[in-house]
Amino acid sequence: MVVDGHSDLLLELCFAERERGEDNPLASRWLQPLRRGDVGLQVCAIYVEPDMAPDEALGEALHQARVFNAAVRANPDDVFAVRSAADVDAVGGPRVGLMLALEGASALGSDPLLIDVLADLGVRMASLTWNERNAFASGCGSEGGLTDLGARLVDRILDRGLVLDLAHASVQTFWDVLGRGPGSVVVSHAACRALHDHPRNLSDDQLRALADRDGVLGLMPHPLTLGPDHSTLHGFAEHVEHAVSAMGIGHVAVGGDFLRQITRAMGIGDEVIDGVRADSALDGLEGPEDYPRLADVLRSRGWEERDVAALLGANLLALIGRVLSP
């Protein structure tokens, strides 16, 4: 069973609803890929462009939360919302668990207490930044670290029993947050800087520090973070194995961030980020339906079944179960 730490599928669901008038795009576009990949829990991110005006950004975040909850209501026999530790216990049954997340806090403007609104709508994982610097922290594309408002937001995220995600954080933000002793945190989608020196990736010191705090890294199988020498299934496995060597098998997971289907559906697949097309993907690992191929590659490299199961699902599921309220 797979527990995937990051997907932007809500962007496609919103696009299908707004632009094409589709009534149930989750069922027509994503249920089958998730089932074919044996995904038991998919984290679904709210993503808002960081340069949006504050009122517009908050409205867009609320809209995506509405679309998430509408999709859950429309498919009660196929999916359920993961909002508590009790829901985590149900993951692995006949229905796919979906957990709502917030990717970057720019939609909160400068009010950390607005995280309560999103938590009340079902958000159970939250990060501080995308690549930008906002009122709370600096992302990996900017200089600086955690602000005073950001410290308040971190505290509120933890007080509400949400999973704290440090994906896209600057190096200084990463260390500032860990210095506050937050307990188990995740980096939901990134890779290893030792193999590809990219701002999105974590150094070995960061990997070890994350593991020391009982955290989890979700490895991201995208050419952007893997680099040109590792943009194959076996190259991704090398990132996985490097992370395991630095952190231990109990602290590594997957965070797919599969963008090919989403960006092509929205007509933006040809956009280029750091020299890489938005719709780039690994041959054989283009979406959640391909996770069985990753499992086969790991087995071919000598992995035992228990370690494959830990990477693909058990590690991240255990962290979520520890953090969420009963």
Image (tube, rainbow, N blue to C red):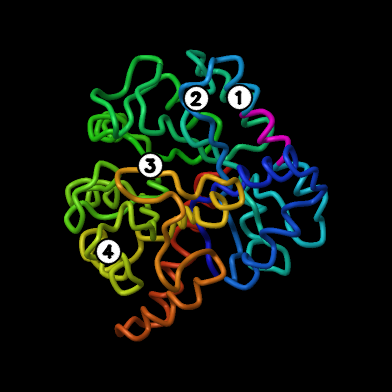
Q: Earlier in the sequence, mark 2 or mark 4?
A: 2
| In the foreground, 266 or 215 | 266
Give me the C-alpha separation between circle 2 and circle 4: 33 Å
Please give the range of residues in magenta: 61-67
Q: Residues within 10 Å of mark 1 (few under 14, many from 20)?
A: some
Do tag 2 and tag 1 residues touch (Cβ < 8 Å)?
A: yes
Judged by depth in the image, the label closer to the viewer, 4 or 1, is 4
The residue that mark 1 highlights is 116
Give me the C-alpha separation between circle 3 and circle 4: 16 Å
Judged by depth in the image, the label closer to the viewer, 3 or 2, is 3
Tell me which residue sits at (35%, 63%) in the image. Answer: 250
Identified by mark 3, the residue type is Ala
The residue that mark 4 highlights is 239
Give me the C-alpha separation between circle 2 and circle 1: 8 Å
Q: Earlier in the sequence, mark 3 or mark 4?
A: 3
Q: Residues within 10 Å of mark 3 (few under 14, many from 20)?
A: many
Q: Secondary structure at mark 2?
A: helix
| Image location of residue 37, percent across then percent down | 57, 71
Left/right of residue 164 with respect to residue 35 in the rendered view: left
Q: Earlier in the sequence, mark 2 or mark 1?
A: 1
